[in-house]
Amino acid sequence: MSITNATSLRKNLFGYLGAATQNDEKIIVTTKTGNAAIVSEEYLRALEETCYLYNIPGMPESIEKGAKTPLSECKEIDWRKELK
């Protein structure tokens, strides 16, 4: 994670944007009125999806249970057939 101020951000904007998009680096920009963050679109979308899923009642427990289930106990599902 990088921390910079607005003046430095203006001078090196393309470098910071490249670091965020290509290296998945998080950039904190400090200002007199508060701080802001620059993250890649991919990171932001993943964060939003995680927040959405964790707000569904029972979903956090289901995800945790699934993560602890051994692969040998899992079955393969054809979602195309399941969704018809």
Image (cartoon, rainbow, N blue to C red):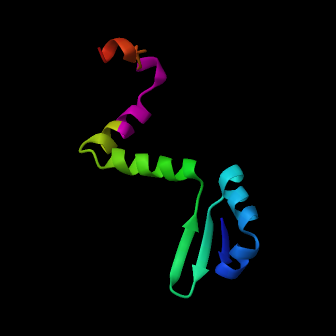
Q: Residue furthest left?
A: 57
Mainly helix, strand or loop, the magenta region?
A: helix
At horizontal 43% and vertical 15% (from top left) the residue drawn is: 76
Residue stretch in magenta: 63-73
Tell whether 27 sits left or right of 83: right
**Count of numbered badges drawn on the protein:** 0
At horizontal 60% and vertical 54% (from top left) the residue drawn is: 40
Tell whether 30 sits left or right of 71: right
Tell whether 38 sits left or right of 49: right
Across and down, in percent, residue 78 comes to 40, 13
Give residue 58's quadrant in the image. top left
Give residue 36's quadrant in the image. bottom right
Across and down, in percent, residue 68 comes to 42, 34
Across and down, in percent, residue 34 comes to 51, 82
The reply to whether the magenta stretch includes residue 57 is no
Of residues 24 and 75, the one nearer the viewer is 24
Q: Residue furthest bottom?
A: 32
Q: Quadrant of the N terminus?
A: bottom right
Give residue 12's quadrant in the image. bottom right
Across and down, in percent, residue 20 comes to 66, 57
- For residue 68, above or below residue 71: below
- For residue 26, above or below residue 55: below
Q: Residue furthest top?
A: 81
Q: Quadrant of the C terminus?
A: top left
At horizontal 41% and vertical 19% (from top left) the residue drawn is: 73
